[in-house]
Amino acid sequence: MLRSKAGPKLFRRLVERIREGQACGEVDPAIDVREAAAFLQMTMQGIQLAARAGGDAKSLRALARFAISRLRAR
């Protein structure tokens, strides 16, 4: 129940933050904001699942860094 309520709010906030990143030149302006938000949200869920399955902190941080690096302006 909580996840179903938080999901849309998280998605909207991710969209806002990605747009902010595009405006200040940190995020590639060619990236589709909604697709990027969905990608990050799914990645976050995957990292949570990996953590529950026993993934170590170093590996989980590497996954997060990789996901964020896909958004950077080139």
Image: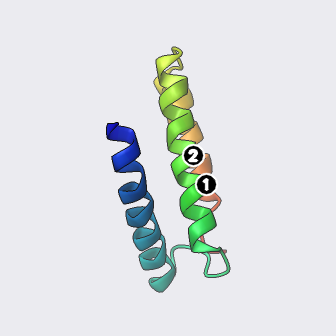
Say which residue appears at 50% left-offset and 42% top-offset: 44
**Three-letter amino acid code at the position of disc 1:** Phe
Residue 20 position (above or below residue 48):
below
Residue bearing mark 2: 42
Q: Contact, CB < 8 Å: mark 1 with mark 2?
A: yes
Q: Where residue 39 is drawn, which disc sits there?
A: 1
Quarter of the figure that contains the C terminus: bottom right
Camera-side residue of 24 and 36: 36
Residue 37, picture quadrant: bottom right
Quarter of the figure that contains the N terminus: top left
**Label 2 crowding class (10 Å Cα cut-off): few <14, some 14-19, many 20+?**
few
Kind of element beneath mark 1: helix
Relative side of 24 to 63, left or right: left
| Image colouring | rainbow
**Three-letter amino acid code at the position of disc 2:** Met
**Label 1 crowding class (10 Å Cα cut-off): few <14, some 14-19, many 20+?**
some
